[in-house]
Amino acid sequence: MSRRIALIPAAGHGSRFGSATPKQYLLLNGRPLLAHTLDVLCGCAGIDDVAVVISPGDEWFDGFAWPGRVQVLRVGGASRAESVANGLAALAADEDDWVLVHDAARCCLSPDALQRLLDDVGDDAIGGILAQPVADTVKQGKVGRIAATVPRDGLWLAQTPQMFRAGLLAEALQDAANPAITDEASAIELLGHAPRLVVGEAQNFKVTWPGDLALAGAILAARKGLQA
Ligand code: C5P
């Protein structure tokens, strides 16, 4: 029976966020953002193992308390793809094990969306990702002006987790330095495969800009209130 392993790349510096402390360690309702992300994955009965990839020079991780069953891999790389590839190599997973790569910065992933991904991907031959159909009109811009309107029909915004077999993902990430690889699915697509699209949710956004932190905090607080 193949295992399902959650792998969370958390070795970024969050340069767009503009804070000296990497965003995954910023406090959200009293706990680091990364702890909220790990809560969802650790709380899912369908996930067997949870591993987090941090930078070898990380100065923050040891200063906090983390959910119990988290394996720490200090093998982060220069890019997200390299951090994932290094983490995958350090996991020593079986070829057929499923690996669910999830951004540390997507702390508002809901248990329902995670379960939907597990159910819909099932034993798919390729694997799949959570993604959201584009709702807004999409503009292409040049020097601050609209250059074109891009038809949004069939466009999706890729989210995480992205779920693939460990063997296929390792093969796809052999060239992790390729700038065309911006998520796991893009690496799998470069091998000629078509990953499954599973409808995600707007709340599963990636905390990227300073204003995102307050929104994430409000979503998590509201969810706790509903559960209480
Ligand atoms: O920077 P961005 O928000 O796109 O990063 C997405 C995820 O990849 C974050 O969880 C970040 O910590 C991680 N990452 C990484 N190693 C890098 C760059 C980003 O693990 N070198």
Image: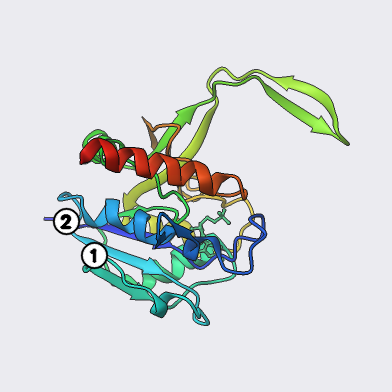
Residue type at mark 2 is Ser
- Residue 73 can be seen in this image: yes
Residue type at mark 1 is Asp
At label 1, counting other C-alpha atoms closer than 10 Å, the crowd grade (few under 14, some 14-19, many 20 or more) is: few
At 52% from the left edge and 34% from the top edge, which residue is drawn? 157
At 23% from the left edge and 65% from the top edge, which residue is drawn? 94
Residue receiving disc 1:
94
- Relative side of 9 to 123, left or right: right
- Calculate the distance from the C-alpha at mark 1 to the C-alpha at mark 2: 8 Å
Return the x and y of residue 138 as percentages of the image width and height.
67, 24
- Relative side of 153 to 100, left or right: right
Return the x and y of residue 178 as percentages of the image width and height.
61, 58
Point out which mark residue 2 bears. Answer: 2
Q: From what the image shows, is residue 61 above or below residue 12?
A: below
Point out which mark residue 102 bears. Answer: none
At 64% from the left edge and 63% from the top edge, which residue is drawn? 19
